[in-house]
Amino acid sequence: MEKADILRHTNGGLDVFRHYVPGNWRVGKPFLNPFYKDTHASFNIYYDKRSATYYMKDFGNPDYSGDCFALVAMMAGRNCADKEDFITVMETIAHDMNLFLPTKPEAGHHCVSPAVVTSTPARTSFTLTEHALTPTELAWWKAYGITPEVLQRYRVSAVSEVFFNNGNHLVATAARPTFLYRFQDSDDCTLKLYSPFSRNRFMYKNKVDGQLFGFDRLPPKGEVVVLTGGEKDVLTVSSLGFPAFCLNSETATLDEALLNGLKERFRQVIVLYDMDETGLRSSMNLCTLHALQRIKLPLPGSKTEKDISDYVRMKLAEGISPEEVAVQFRVWMEEAKTPEEEVLEPCLIRHSLPPVKPDRVLSINFQSVASAGGVVCITGGSGTGKSNYAGAILSGTLHTVLEDSIDTLGIQVAPNVKRKAVLLFDTEQSHYQSYENLERILLRAGVTTQPDYLQVMNLCRIPRREREALIEKALDMAVRKHKGIYCTVIDGLADLIASANDEDEAVRIVEWAQRLAEKYRMVLISIVHTAGLPEKVRGHLGSELTRKATAVIDIETDKKSGNSLVKVLKLREGSPVMAGISMFGWDEKKKMHVSCV
């Protein structure tokens, strides 16, 4: 299958646009973009004479620019620049539009290639011979919880042979059956062949616009109707006792008039699409556009575990009865949520569901400084010992049992019992200075060999705009390798943004740090400079960080002794007054900073 084949059989892509873009629009005339809440008609489908191809252009939203493949890729969450994604896009178009383009013959089928048809419904592309469903075929459907009564109600039959106009011949067997979906009772309705074990599983005949599988079997009124991702899912949901129908594909648009009619007949319209990338993206777009609720199945989204039919098959194989599965499905329907509600769900605090209490990691004088998931701000002027203080904390994380012999400069560090990852990202100092800091971390911990779970990275050579992504990638790798992250230090958080005085950037980077700490259930320590005055953290970044941090520790130089003076300015989990004030200074013999008694 080639790009040129699709363009040749779809009038340069115009038929593809007409298939996926709803409404009575005209080529070359601007209209409202139906894929979002557009208020100004600036969306256009136009013809490019040089390439003999149709393109789209939305002057109000540059995302909607390109040919018909770009449109389908956007709807399916694919990237046309990716070879595998582009193949998927072409296969989606061919399937949705009944474009039976030449493919390789399959074992067990005496069919070279079906006749090629365009998006105009072809009424004579093939003829077929039907037969009543055999016990073997009924057993195949039963594995998905689909009953003979439902198959009969939805006019599903079995096919013995298919004769194509080009002379090809398909013979179904017990091992490779073919079934027929009939969309309505009339003779000229849409017909769809379903060969579950073939590469080309679906073939249309008499594809009639506006006919949707299962729609004519919906009751006049009811509590709920389920929009599924395909015909088999309609049959499964119906067998569970709930009315259902499907569009011609998950990437198809839902007609506004049809939806309004459903809302008048049913209290609730629920979307139940596949759990793969395309299904999740399509259900998200559909539910967001029309304020609908959706069910997200507890499935990984793999080829054999992605839809409600797969779920029912798996549960029945475990010995769970269809009635029990139906009860679970009803619970899911009652818990169905809009995309906005899905975002809010993790934010809800319920007294009956207390969260797991995070482990305390850092404390000063028995006052909690930070637990797992907390953000700590260490601030101070240049050369006051901020990096060395953070390094002392990292030294404490290198032990799996409590070590009183380690001088962590007045802050107590809980043992890293599970040897989770410990990371230091340096954005300020040279590579050699970072190496010296690593040496002092190991020296203070009494460790001669760097543990593999301790990672020190100097990001000075990395452009600022790329540092966030690199840090996230490093954290992902660390959590996979070491089954968790204990503590992360970012020495120079301000160096991840262009300016510490940019309020929007400051808010964004602090929220980013909070998300990372919560996501990995780690303590994240951020080191920032003061603004030239003691206890005044630099810029909008400092203001935002001091508000959001669980603890703020200020380190300044004591004018009398020249040592570093540690003041706890804020403790969300304890008392700054009880934490007290401490000092540390350089010990030439030990070649590191030590606590001052």
Image: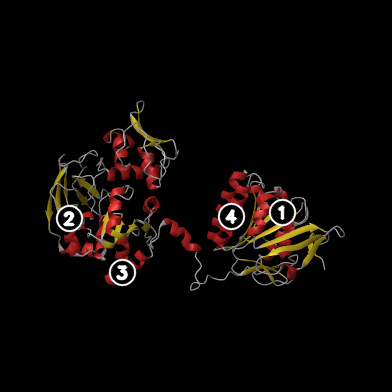
How far apart are labels 4 and 3 at the CA level?
41 Å
Q: N-terminal of the two: label 4 or label 3?
A: 3
Mark drawn on residue 325: 3
Which circle, 2 or 3, is nearer the viewer? 3
Which circle, 3 or 1, is nearer the viewer? 1
Q: N-terminal of the two: label 1 or label 4?
A: 4
**In the rendering, at what x and y percent does residue 145 appear?**
25, 65
Mark drawn on residue 537: 1
Q: Mark 2 near mark 1, Cβ–Cβ under 8 Å?
A: no
Q: N-terminal of the two: label 3 or label 1?
A: 3
Q: For the C terminus, which image quadrant?
A: bottom right
Q: Is residue 37 above or below residue 557?
A: above
Residue farthest toward the right in the current orientation of the protein: 560
- Which element is circle 4 on? helix
Image-quadrant location for residue 3: top left
Image-quadrant location for residue 36: top left
**In the rendering, at what x and y percent does residue 215 appear?**
23, 54
Q: In this view, does 537 lie above or below 238?
A: above
Q: N-terminal of the two: label 4 or label 2?
A: 2
How far apart are labels 1 and 4 at the CA level?
17 Å
**In the rendering, at what x and y percent does residue 227 appear?**
30, 56
Q: Mark 1 near mark 4, Cβ–Cβ under 8 Å?
A: no
